[in-house]
Every structure is written in structure tokens, then in C-alpha cells.
Amino acid sequence: VQLVESGGGLVQAGGSQRLSCAVSGSSFSTYQMGWLRQAPGKDLEVVAAINWSGDDTHYADSVKGRFTISRDNAKNMLYLQMNNLKPEDTAVYHCAVASVWGGDSTSLTDFLTWGRGTQVTVSS
């Protein structure tokens, strides 16, 4: 599977940005998906996850109420709408495929592979 992220860039604190991920292959609608991020000098972390049908989601506490993950199975696309961005959201964001649906127990070890990522920089 190939994962190609887009939509990153520079945004001011308080602003919004929408990330997109194009996923190759015919099995996208069966994949559990997510967004991971890695800030400078920090470990990779789970930002959000969504189950195969899109009717169940999970968010890191740090982004709850600000970020929304969604998917379009007809277009093989995954999205992350980010509102009220903060400087601490600055990171490389990666689209990822998970082997299982972990729900509220979603962890980094659930994810099998991820794309090269797109840089999001939030200025204060």
C-alpha cells in the first residue's frame, strides 16, 4: 500500500489546516486508518484514528475538540481537519494503516506502515 500525504504548510496559531492522504489499492475500505505525528526531538505519537467504516474514531487528549479525522472510502482518501492550531502542533504528520481497531486503546504499535509525511508548522 502507498500513502501520500498533502496539505501541510505554515499557519498562524489559532488558524486551521486540512491534511489529505491518498491511499493506493482496492482494499482501503477495509483498513483501519490513522494520523501520526513527530515533533522535532520527540517520539512519533498517535494523533487520531478511524475504523474501516468511519463510524468510530479516537483522538489523543492533546487534540480532542480541535482535530477531526474522516475518510471517503469511495475516493480512497483520509483527512485530518485541524482547527485552533497551536505552536505545539508543529510536527511532521503521517497517514498510517493499522492492523487492528484499538478504539480508546489505540497505540502506536497498532500501526503497520505510514507515509513520508507532510510538515505542519504553527507560528505563534
Image: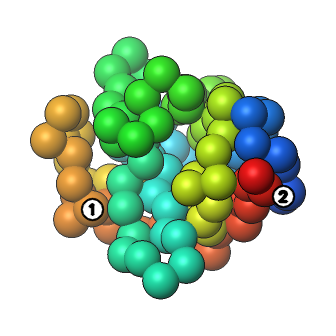
Q: Quadrant of residue 117?
A: bottom right
- Can you tell which of label 2 and label 1 is closer to the viewer? 2
Q: Earlier in the sequence, mark 2 or mark 1?
A: 2
Q: Is residue 65 above or below residue 71?
A: above
Which element carries disc 2, helix, strand or loop?
A: strand
- Nearer to us in this view, 83 or 95: 83
Does residue 28 show up?
Answer: yes
- Nearer to us in this view, 51 or 36: 36
Q: Which residue is mark 2?
A: 9
Marks 2/1: CA–CA distance: 24 Å
Q: Which mark is residue 57?
A: none
Q: Residue at x 40, y 41 (%)?
A: 62
Residue at the limit of the structure toward the bottom, as seen here: 41
Q: Which residue is mark 1?
A: 108
Question: Residue 27's x, y, as percent?
Answer: 47, 46
Q: Are marks 2 and 1 in contact (CB under 8 Å)?
A: no
The three-letter amino acid code for the residue at tag 1 is Leu
Which element carries disc 1, helix, strand or loop?
A: helix
